[in-house]
Image: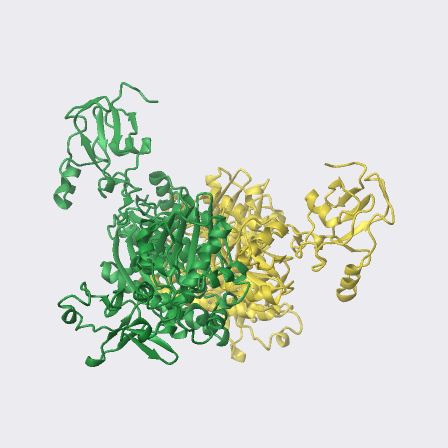
Chain colours: A green, B yellow
Amino acid sequence: MTDTRDPLVIFTPSGKRGHFPVGTPVLTAARQLGVDLDSVCGGRGICSKCQISPGYGEFPKHGVTVAADALSDWNAVEERYKSKRGMIDGRRLGCQARVMGDVVIDVPPESQVHKQVVRKAATAREIIMDPATRLYYVEVAEPDMHEPSGDLERLSAALKSQWQIDGIEADLTVLKKLQPALRKGGWAVTVALTRGNHDALPRLIDLWSGYDEGGIYGLAIDLGSTTIAAHLCDLRDGRVLASAGVMNPQIRFGEDLMSRVSYAMMNPGGDAEMTAAVRTALNGLAQTIATEGGIDPVRIVETVFVCNPVMHHLLLGIDPVELGQAPFALATSSAMSLWAADLGLNTLNPNARVYVLPLIAGHVGADCAAVALSEEPQKAEDMVLIVDVGTNAELLCGNRDRVLACSSPTGPAFEGAQISSGQRAAPGAIERIEIDPATKEPRFKVIGCDLWSTEPGFAEATAGTGITGICGSGIIEAVAEMRIAGILDPSGLIGSAEQIGSPRLRADGRTHSYVIHDGSASGGPVITVTQNDIRAIQLAKSALYAGARLLMDELHIDKVDRVVLAGAFGAHISPKHAMVLGMIPDVPLEKVISAGNAAGTGARIALCNVGARRQIEQVVREIHKVETAIEPRFQEHFVAANAIPHATAPFPELSKIVTLPDVSYNTAGSEGGRRRRRG
Amino acid sequence: MTDTRDPLVIFTPSGKRGHFPVGTPVLTAARQLGVDLDSVCGGRGICSKCQISPGYGEFPKHGVTVAADALSDWNAVEERYKSKRGMIDGRRLGCQARVMGDVVIDVPPESQVHKQVVRKAATAREIIMDPATRLYYVEVAEPDMHEPSGDLERLSAALKSQWQIDGIEADLTVLKKLQPALRKGGWAVTVALTRGNHDALPRLIDLWSGYDEGGIYGLAIDLGSTTIAAHLCDLRDGRVLASAGVMNPQIRFGEDLMSRVSYAMMNPGGDAEMTAAVRTALNGLAQTIATEGGIDPVRIVETVFVCNPVMHHLLLGIDPVELGQAPFALATSSAMSLWAADLGLNTLNPNARVYVLPLIAGHVGADCAAVALSEEPQKAEDMVLIVDVGTNAELLCGNRDRVLACSSPTGPAFEGAQISSGQRAAPGAIERIEIDPATKEPRFKVIGCDLWSTEPGFAEATAGTGITGICGSGIIEAVAEMRIAGILDPSGLIGSAEQIGSPRLRADGRTHSYVIHDGSASGGPVITVTQNDIRAIQLAKSALYAGARLLMDELHIDKVDRVVLAGAFGAHISPKHAMVLGMIPDVPLEKVISAGNAAGTGARIALCNVGARRQIEQVVREIHKVETAIEPRFQEHFVAANAIPHATAPFPELSKIVTLPDVSYNTAGSEGGRRRRRG
């Protein structure tokens, strides 16, 4: 049909081009060429989503010269829009500007439907906007007694003719609103349609009279055992309006996962109590985050959850008892598409859709799937180990050939729990520490203060919060530094004041403790690292390392090319100290990368891009799961990893550090026995 | 693959045949040939649904001789089943009996999946069982830590391998029950799966441990303005376990449809009040009918509704206000597939599916669609007029070429409302009447007594109920008989005692009344037919006739071949009297057929056969709707139909009856003016 005598229209950045008759609206040309140019109002000059930037003059690259009159004149619709809302000079509305001659038209990023969301971390994958729920403005035929049909059927016909959407389903609560909205809006409505599962029809989940600008929003929720963190995103452009977190109120039923499963086992109705608690918290969180983002929570029409299997079952109202015992059978491992009402999330839009990422195995959750979605080990050219440490550690190892997953029972020590001076990461907590190998004196930093403890002004700066304890990253650095400074022997035993030659070593029953900070003079705590703390960290790091080694064994490799640390823990931990401690396999330090909250990022990706959901469902089906509990080699690796090793040869900076006297102290009690019970 | 040296297996009544290797179970052969042989347990000898009757000896028709050893020996599974549950002699279990030689196998009706449900009315269509929800017994693999997968995924895999069902969705409430049910049932469950809408996956709506025999049931509900009637059906065989009805509690908000719409218009929240009232009544009805049928109401997994548009909107919680004014716009006219929870039907299974038949137009409801489903005018070879009289009359007219529909505002006079001595059809109501043309003396029958009022013993027989009023069929007969007896002139005016020569005519203001029964001596009512009663019936019958004539005009016909009277009204009305009155167009009396509760039958069909739902949706799309309110010819027909005509020539029995003196009485008041206001 193309007539080369017609004007040539070239779109950038796509490079798509075609000939169109004089008078063709730019939006029409873009649609016919499949150019990614947004429109909510369908070309009626209302929404202004189709803004374009025409280029004029010579374009040798494209072989065209664009005359000043290549597009129709600036018109009244554009003038009204610009005077009312403002528009960048040089921009035109694609639905108003018509092709008059050869023209080069740039589609700015904000006018693209599938816009990319800018991510801070350069290494992370981009999010392409393609949410399950979208807004459509439609003009609906008025009822006609001669051709009786329902308002919904006429809306459906309008969606077909104006948006090529063939068939919809409607929720009763929306159907209820349809008649008044159509009449109030002069037979025009803005509808939110969500794509159906499988081959089901798109579903009408809300609507507003006329052309509505209130927008639609989504929540990406990382439901952790300890913390529930949420991002509120604009579903039109992926922008994060607000982020908020609350403690998981299930903590009162048990700090860690297994104690919650035990609570459910031992208390009839205990699972329902925990389900109710977390749902109440989620409703509160949705309200908080909506207020913070300045929106009405009924505008939240989509929610994505990532969580570990126990949190998953408790969220869905499924008794997690099977997850507390072999064979750790999940009720379901598939991704779930639900409605907010199914989960009692009544703060949100009554028809809000809920998507829960798939679980990988009984111990490897949707949070790990979300990490895979964000970090994409299945696409890696190099061999990557991804470590997501929460109360349990979840590990992914592999490359584009094959990806394995497992979880490792690290326990909560890495989060500062079950540590004598341990606390959560909060102002006043020691988060970084260095110990002088000569004097054995420490210096440290606390959360909320940028100064080291030895710098002037530190005491004043921390007077407000005090120095209250030591958090996860702090205890890891403390143990590693104690080893580097020779305070610990390779088996992890703390030397005495005499052996080490420092008054900071204090006797503590049959073992010794190292004093980091003594605040007792001013009524504050004495912050120490005890022998039990060392043992807790040794158990945790042995479990983590053993998990990684187990996956490496399965892959028949003895080293990885890259280690990605995910989670809040990963963002704060010092790679050097983690490696001294032997938490992770040896790699060059610059190959240890923090991915930040990768699970939360994965949740955001699934929220903003419906195709990513199908993709991660497929990836999860292909990930091979390794169950640590039944692998004898896990025990072997676990036992072997208990020592705090020398650094290996390829890393000069570590080699230097660990050229230590190989001191050995008397053991107190049978640590081996305790370890086996824990393992 | 067929080897003709293998034994030949012939199934009757289907006639399907094929060669199968020695040792093939009969059920397997049946499945491979597509023979309709039921099985819930999948061939495990548990359910006994696959019973067959082998035939032995000579079968010249089929050209085979069946030896006594054509099937494998009676086995222990069959013996156990027969001794425990009983089995007709000669029957075998299709899953146990194996083919050993040529054999002829009859599949008895009760072993067919798509069994026919026996209907009483010979003219009515058969119901072929093919419900949306079915039971499947499955044996599920146990969880394996080496290949972790959810219980739901293993159930899904089992459904695929054992039942060729590829992919399911699950409700959360069922998912919650899955783990304990599987473990309790030794890794076997009976699941209820309902087919999805469009191309959506089948949905798991309930499940029970092991092989469950509790069954699944459905409700077919005819939700009328006055009465809610329900049938409880076994979804396995279509058997009606119980039928029950309750008054529609919305009556307290308005007797007829328009007064309920007015209530909604004039009272904020009035529609919600009416919605709540009907839903409460439905829950009560479900409980009652389940008790009566001896089942647990949670076994009710499907419900089908038929109702007029106003009842439809109020059931769904949609404000019916638009239905009270032109252009009578429906919120939706499409069939609806919902969940019981959407309608607050919490007596039923929490995942029970609800199907609401499509509406035809703003005044022509799903009840009319159900009549079309039951009576199938779109398949008729002859020209049929179907009249469903409730508070409004809905009419269908056409044949296999074309079907038209309209509703006609008859008002409630045909139900005995707005009649001076009128009452609902209940014991004590006069339902039949004859008036002697010579003496003008009446004789009548009342509901609850088989005797005519002139027969001995009538007074004693009716002493209990008394003679309390006159119901819809009674008033129609009374008016027709008054015309036949010359008490009415063709314009509908009642003569005086002097004019008629009977003391039963009494002055009543400026008009006269006819006394049918004077019970005042014993403190009972005087039952009369007043001039206003005659006018009310004339208006109603004119509206009904005008509707029929309007459809006939559109079809360019001046007579129909057959008239079907649907509804309780249709079942009780005398065709002769209806024709004397001019309610329906003239046809031979034997061509006036009562279809009973055709709307209720349509609901049952849609409940038992999911294909019928798609069929009626298609039929409704093709029915042409005629809106009486905007057709000037409706007014013309209405005015012209006001008289009570002579019978026309082709009907000798009526011609004889209506050879009447063409008396004419003075009119009292301007009836024409009143009629126009009503019309």
Q: Is residue B548 visible?
A: yes
**Residue beneath the point at 82% across and 46% down:** B100
Position of A190 relative to A225 (above/below): above
Give the number of callouts. Answer: 0
The residue closer to the viewer here, B26 or A434, is A434
Q: Position of residue B436 (x, y in %)?
A: 59, 61
The residue closer to the viewer here, B263 or B674, is B263
Looking at the figure, which quarter contains the N terminus of chain B? top right
Q: Position of residue B573 (x, y in %)?
A: 56, 58
**Residue beneath the point at 57% across and 58% down:** B144
The residue closer to the viewer here, A127 or A391, is A391
Position of A283 relative to B120 (above/below): below
The residue closer to the viewer here, B65 or B281, is B65
Residue most toward the top?
Answer: A5
**Side of B156 where A521 appears, left or right:** left
**Side of A382 where B485 appears, left or right:** right
* Picture quadrant of residue A141: top left
Position of A587 relative to A29 (above/below): below
Q: Position of residue A520 (x, y in %)?
A: 23, 80
**Side of B44 where B313 appears, left or right:** left
Q: Position of residue B325 (x, y in %)?
A: 34, 53
* Picture quadrant of residue A31: top left
**Side of B342 where B145 appears, left or right:** right
